[in-house]
Amino acid sequence: MRALGLAIVLVGSTVGAAAAQRSVMPSVPQSLTLSDAVDLALRYNRSYRQVANDRPAAAWGVRNAYSQLFFPSMSASLSFGYSGAGSQTFLDQEFTQESSTIGSDYGLNLNWRLSGTTLTQPGLARAQMRATEAQIDGAEVNLRANVQQQYLAALQAEAQVRIVEIQVTRNEEFLRLAQARFQVGQATMLDVRQAEVAKGQADVRLLQARQGVIVEKLRLYQQIGLPAPEDPTTLVLPDTFPVTEPEWQLGTLLRAADMDNPDVAVLEARAAAARSSERSAKAQWLPTLSLSAGWSGFTREYSNPDFLVASARGQLDASRTECEYTNSAWLNPGQTPLPCSGLALSPEDEQRIIAGNNVFPFSFTTQPFSARVSLSLPIFTQFGREADISQASQLADDAMEEVENQRLWVRTNVSQAYYGLIAAYQAIGIQEANRVAAQEQLRLATERYRVGSGTFFELLDAQVAEQTAEADYINAIYAYHRTIATLEAAVGRPLR
């Protein structure tokens, strides 16, 4: 009981230590670059780790396939048994066992099987391993794209906050200007109230924009796979992304996507594995060679050794009686009598019998070595073999069709992203011009209202136009960056 309690304590402490180790998570640095965010996501994103966990199983599948081809399987057995005293009846014969027995036996067996399946299994396992690696690479590309998109979304939310903060400051100035003009009789209370409403609306938009930053940073932590702090706004995103004119050529991007797109690579690897499965199914036509070998031994010990001594004494007594009868009834006068006096059990013989019975559990009686070689060839399998081959061929053909369909899909996505990038870059120039014009319009409206030539409604209209132009400009810039990220994901590798 003491040992059992100690074992429970040790197991409990081990489980507790493992749980504590799982609960300890690294903290995200306060200043997080995009590269650091991707590195952390590759380590802690649960969805990616689920895919990456398939690699060891696939590697062991390859080892298992080669092991089945070149090495026999080996098994060892050891058993112990007990048989009570009594009688057993088999048909009309009754067998009696005067003493209970205990026994043990061992076996060591080797088996090796060579068939079409084992010959083609290594190629199939390697193809499945390549498919697993391609799937992991594809998950990594997709994770990088998702983290980059979310990183850009957080930066865009912060840019929107800066725009709204400028608007709040400007509305405070407008409110002071309206109050000053009202005090000197150059404006009405309506202008003051309109300025107060505009200031309140700007304050609300600032709250919403700051809430948007919190949401986007929380989603960034989620993409990385780590818990967010209590105040996500403490996270600083220092990376900047310049806007440059796209210089990539569509043809070059399409060729790169054919070679690097992870989804295409995954489907190609699966198609290769399907072809290997088809070859494995066709290999059922080949004969099967089987080899087996084994070593074994046993022990059998009577629990009552006196039974063996009595049995041996009884046999010797019967032999001595027969010997004496022969001497008296069958020998002619003058013949040498048989030595009957030696047919008796001495104390040394009894000890030897008792010692010979003391064999349990490991004094085995070794059995002769056995080996077997067989060759089999299936002739008629009720068309099961043909059905397997047909199904494997169908799956292989479907996999190739899926590859070609995915290639077309990728070409469409790359082309769409490329033309979208060109349009996004051009939109930035247009929005920049609109922003400059809106800023000039707001400046003129402010001066007109300051000198009393314009109304406050004109000033508010100009401010709304400037706010919209600023927001559209920021959205255009980040739409450009997101389109590049989408194009990189479609191609399958970074472009800048």
Image: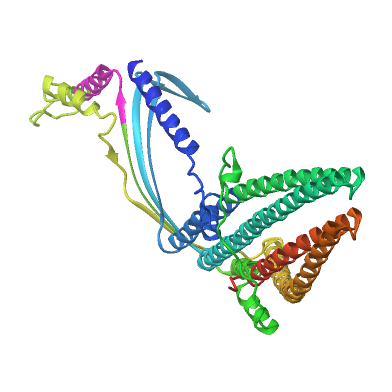
Q: Position of residue 241 (x, y in %)?
A: 61, 66
Where is residue 199, by image quadrant?
A: top right
Quadrant, the N terminus: top left
Q: Position of residue 205 (x, y in %)?
A: 77, 47
Where is residue 444, by image quadrant?
A: bottom right
At a point 8% along the width and 31% down the height, the residue shown is 336
At a point 65% along the width and 81% down the height, the residue shown is 248
Residue 409 higher or lower than 371, as above or below: below
Classify residue 329 as left or right of residue 416. left
Give the residue furthest to the top. Answer: 1
Total marks drawn?
0
Classify residue 184 as left or right of residue 121. right
Residue 136 belongs to the span the image colors magenta: no
341 or 426, nearer to the observer: 426
Q: Position of residue 484 (x, y in %)?
A: 67, 70
At a point 79% along the width and 63% down the height, the residue shown is 443
Q: Which residues are magenta?
A: 300-321
Quadrant, the C terminus: bottom right
Give the residue furthest to the front. Answer: 184
Look at the magenta stretch and give its main secondary structure: helix
Q: Is residue 290 visible in this depiction of the protein?
A: no
